[in-house]
Amino acid sequence: MSPKLIFFGGKGGVGKSTTSAATATYLAKLKPEKKIFLISFDIAHNLGDLFDMEIGDKITQVLPNLWAMEPDAERYTEDFVREFVEKAKKLALDMPLVKKLTNLEQYIEESFSAASIPLAVKNSIFFDQILETENEFDIFVVDLPPTGNMISIFEVPKTTMQVFLKSTLETMDKVLEFVATMRKLNPVNWFRPGASAQRRNQAAELLGMLKELDRRNDRIMRMLKTLSSLRFVTIAERPSYEEIRRAADLVKKYVPLDGVVINKINHEGIDCKYCATETVHQKKYIKMIQEDEHFKDKKIWQTWRMEDEVIGIEKLTEFAKSLYKEDTFEMILRP
């Protein structure tokens, strides 16, 4: 089965975003009948700069069959948390005795605030846009953040549930501890008469949100394992090489690694003393990547250092042609 999601990851500054944008542009041009969606998972978005147009937190058409988006993780997180908090407060405050618990409303808001949600979990919100548009596009090209956050993104489906369950259980423990104390003092009607059905419905809504979060995360994990292809972008130098080696070990339980893009290679015969020395080092690390046990059975793409800035459709297409050469649409999807 061909992958539906193509991820590009690696060290910061090696050209991940350029490679992602160029690949999406090239795939769109190779197969005009296919709908391609380019999405940035990096909070420091720069797709708009590469296409020289405003993209931002909305699905933006770039070519007749290419769309791009730079989702605002903060907004998505705040929207989800706001709904969850309102339901939690309604459930808790519907109990008159519990309502008297000092600062309960503030405690709930702080426990589930967008600010309290870890950055890695916020990053997972990016997957929502893929799930919401899964049936609208044929291929998703994903520009990942630098390696550390990339690993966190692949881990977040389980982390997200842990965060919300932990906060929910801590809040409920606080409420139940208070109720148990008051029960010893005055075992009378703690809840409004006739409101039990309403409370059950409110609790069911909260549980439903958590279950939906769990279903969503299960779907993400299945997509990562069965419909995804990860490619590392690197340059031929030691820090970048060592980073993709470490990352290869860390990602293998989450997503298949199918290839490596070696970017910014010096042209042969370049007349520059410094460049000549750098070229010797580049050849050394290119060979090391090709022979490394992590990558020797993977597709290795190589591309020259571009003379001009890779900005706009024309330059992105030029970069992609330098990178993929004679590769067809199918060969890029399934290297």
Image (cartoon, rainbow, N blue to C red):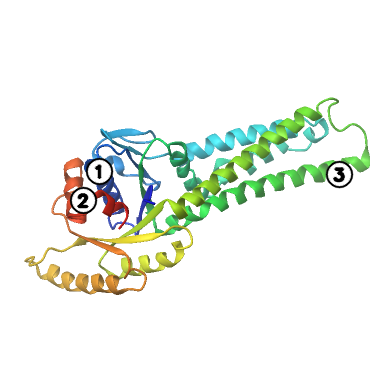
Q: Evaluate if marks 2 and 1 touch, with contact meaning CB atoms under 8 Å apart.
A: yes
State the residue at coordinates (90%, 40%): 183
Task: Mark 3 vs mark 1: give the one in front.
Answer: 1
Q: CA distance from mark 3 to mark 1?
A: 62 Å
Q: Nearer the viewer, residue 45 or 329?
A: 329
Residue of label 1: 25
Q: Is residue 96 left or right of residue 283?
A: right
Q: Is residue 31 left or right of residue 131?
A: left
Q: CA distance from mark 3 to mark 2?
A: 66 Å
Q: Is residue 175 left or right of residue 52?
A: right
State the residue at coordinates (32%, 61%): 259
Residue 206 lies, in percent from the top left, at 67, 37
Dot 3 falls on a residue whose secondary structure is: helix
Q: Which mark is residue 51?
A: none
Residue of label 2: 320
Residue kind at label 2, given as amino acid type = Ala
Q: Which mark is residue 180?
A: 3
Residue 259 against residue 118 in the figure, above or below? below
Residue kind at label 1, given as amino acid type = Thr
Dot 2 falls on a residue whose secondary structure is: helix
Q: Is residue 115 left or right of residue 267?
A: right
